Amino acid sequence: MSEGSFFAELRKRRVIQVAAIYGAVAWGVTEILVTIVEQLFLPAWVSTLAVIAFVVGFPIAMFLSWTFDITPEGIQRTTFGSRRGKISVASAITLLIVCTAGLFLLIRPDIQRSETESGILPALPNSVAVLPFDNASRDPEDMFLSEGFSDELRDQLGRVAGLRIAARSSSLAVRDQAIDAKTMSEKLGVAVLVEGSLRRRGNSLRVSVQLIEGRTGLSLWNQTYERRSQEFLAVQQTIADEIVKHMLPETEAVLATTATRSASANELMLLARYYEQSVRDQADVDVETLLEAIRLYREATEADPESALAHCRLASTLLYLGDLRGAEAPIFKALSLNPDLSEVQVTLGEYYWKRGLRGARGAWERAIELNPNNADALGAYANLVWMQGYAEQPEALYRRALELDPLSLSKLGNLGHFLAQEGRFAETIQIIRRVEELFDDAAAQSLVIRLLELVGRLDESIALAIKLRDSQPENPAHSWSLAELYAEIGEYDTALELDPEGVSVLFKMGRYEELIEVAELLMIDEPQDRYLRYLLAFAYNATGQYRAAIRILRLTGLPDSVIPEAKEAMDIEALVYLISALDGAGDTALATEYAEWFDKRAHVENTSWWINTYRACVLAVLDRDEEALQRLERLSESARLPWTSVVRDTPCFKRYIDEPRYQAVLDNMESRQIELRTRLPVTLAEHNVSL
């Protein structure tokens, strides 16, 4: 097709004029529609749909303008000026269609990302959210029945193959937002909502329940049950059966049984779970309430010794309390009763993980196999995969867990931490914005402060930490956290004013003799505090007391608690402290053995300063000095500010004290501290806060 022929056809058919008019109309209508959507609080997909319609309509308009013309005699088909003009028509139409399809594919990811960031999720097939039931009796003492009933119903449906059940935390979150059913469905990404109420008066029980279609907000099914209190379990089973029939009408699903067949055990479990969840939902652990939950779970296991879930939940609560030995008997009893429950395998994995034993990976893999939609199992397995450097991709697991529990602060936090440590800061900022949009409590603010620190915005972390401290002046933990942030940027006087005897502050300041004195006293009251022991071990190392460091690290179970499976980042750090102490004490053979194990397992490659620092230490112990120095030089790539005390005072780096490359690393860290201290007053003023 020649250029002259093509443009001659364009002029003849007035295609350029039509394209200009179409673009102007599309732009104007879209702008007006966006304004209407915002003002009337309509779903964001309304304006998105209009944009898609205009994009798809563009080639149609161009085809019509090419093929037809408006004349005084009416709409007439345009004739071709030549054979070459016919070829022009076919080629141009093909080009228009291809370009429009390309444009749509280009903007599609942005449209999907926009919907995700706005909190709108596509409804998953056969997906259900069980909202907390209302306590219709208004008696606070019956609250455990209504909330416990919805929790048990949610768990029971979660054991049905083919159903996807929204997690508890997200279901509670939308309940508290005072939004309509359609918006709830969009936020949770589910097709159907289950809501209801429960009232108990004396020995009578009234349960009302309905299924609501998320897309329309219309009721699909509703029923009210009047029963005796002893028939509580039968009502739950009946409701679960009805929900499965509506969700999976063509499937002969085998419904999981209730947690127990004993009415008395069921009420004990409901009350125990109510107490347990009230503790888990708070930042601070209420030990007395947790102990009451444990007592009730024990009574439930006595009332129904054959309930695997009663034993499992007793073990889970004991693990949460930190009683690892106490959790052993009930978790293995649950395993013997029913190893094919996903919840049992999740708790078994947690037991192995916290004990530092082999088996956590297998248990969590089995939990996911039994229930691919178990968000807790996915999240726990993602942490293990990331920590251990296995071949699986932790990001996919984190995102699947978040998809099933989209309003969970902890799962947003897990994904945010992963992205930040991987150096994907733009995506981390998106997580921060999402957290700020969804939550406004202290836990969410603490998470934002932490994530900003990880992406190198320490001045903003400090500004927000001051706001959090001022909003809750009665909570000393906020001042302690703020003190650590000031210590990281080298504002030591301010840090000491905020927390004069804080071991973390003394550690970051390098005041090890004082740290040892304070930590040894604290250990009398907190002998099981591993973090405290690890700090004390580092201080012993930094002051040349290697045997003392080895002794205290051995008391934490090292190296057996880390080899073969490390549980947390600080356990890996502690193993490096042990390697360094052994090397400093002259136990070179043992130090080399542990260092070689560490080196073989350290497959994670990113810009995180602590990963590169501890790998450098291990390489130094193995006499691989060039590799160690290269690792240390990578600290300048870390967005997060490295801790000076670790890089300067870890004994394995003593050999580099006169090495210019090592000194350049320390100088770079100091210059970054100075830069942050210089920038901080401006940031505080921007946030309108002061210390």
Image (cartoon, rainbow, N blue to C red):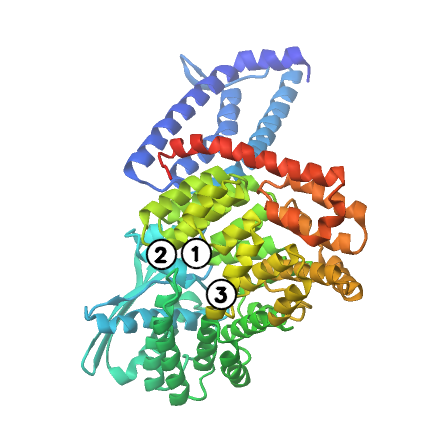
Occupied quadrant, residue 174:
bottom left
Check if mark 1's residue and mark 2's residue have beta carbons within 8 Å. Answer: yes
Residue for point 73% across, 55% down: 618
Find numbered disc 1 in the image and state the secondary structure of the residue it sits on. Answer: loop
How far across and down, in percent of the image, does residue 465 sit? 41, 45
- Quadrant housing residue 227: bottom left
Q: Where is residue 233? Give x, y as percent.
A: 33, 81
Compute the Cα span from label 1 to label 2. 8 Å
Camera-nearest residue between 143 and 103: 143
Residue occupied by mark 2: 173
Element assignment for label 2: helix
CA separation in Å, label 2 and label 3: 42 Å
Q: Is residue 147 above or below residue 671?
A: below
Residue type, numbered disc 3: Leu
Q: Residue at x 60, y 64 (%)?
A: 567
> Label 1 belongs to which residue?
408
Q: Is residue 400 left or right of residue 82?
A: left
